[in-house]
Amino acid sequence: MAVNGKGPYDPQNIFARILRGEIPCKKVFENEWVLAFHDIAPKAPVHILIIPKNAYVSFMDFSATAPAEEIAGVTRATGEIARAQGLEEGGYRLITNAGTNSGQEVPHFHLHLLGGKALPIFAH
Ligand code: AMP
């Protein structure tokens, strides 16, 4: 069921629970800004979710309200994770679903990092 991406933020969403350690995840990376873990239903050989530690419903919320330092921190960490996963050679895709038309399911902002093979080009 897609979410609207605008909130209010639901502290019981599954990624909030992962951040609180209430649900396990296959952690890839963590620093002061982000937690990154393997997607439970991978769509590519590498499919990692990168989530801010703070509460944002979607990119709509994050891009409008996060402090510049945090936006930089999340962006920098995402690049570091892709590099550490060996994805720079072959390239990779970053996706964020925001709101109903995108099919966003989890109402905590996250980036999908996909790679490890030639990815299909989007149909329109
Ligand atoms: P989105 O549609 O952009 O909200 O994507 C949500 C993603 O979260 C999907 O790719 C799911 O497979 C993934 N997901 C849902 N629950 C979990 C979980 N417990 N651990 C890891 N990934 C999950």
Image: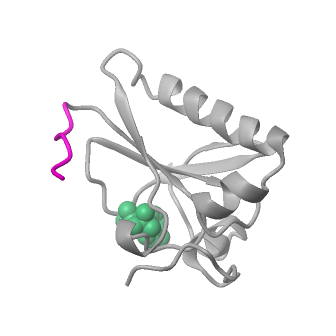
Per the image, is 116 magenta?
A: no
- Is residue 18 placed above or below 75 in the rendered structure? below
Q: Nearer the viewer, residue 9 or 88?
A: 9
* Image quadrant containing the N terminus: bottom left
2 relative to 56 in the view: left or right:
left
- Is residue 31 placed above or below 96 in the rendered structure? above
- Magenta part of the chain: 118-124
- Is residue 80 placed above or below 1 in the rendered structure? above
Occupied quadrant, residue 12: bottom right
Residue 94 % position (x, y): 43, 41
Instruction: Please say whether residue 53 is visible from this viewpoint.
Output: no
The residue drawn where x is 52% and y is 52% is 37
Q: Quadrant of ligand 1?
A: bottom left
The residue drawn where x is 76% and y is 46% is 33
The residue drawn where x is 67% and y is 63% is 61
- Is residue 13 placed above or below 71 in the rendered structure? below
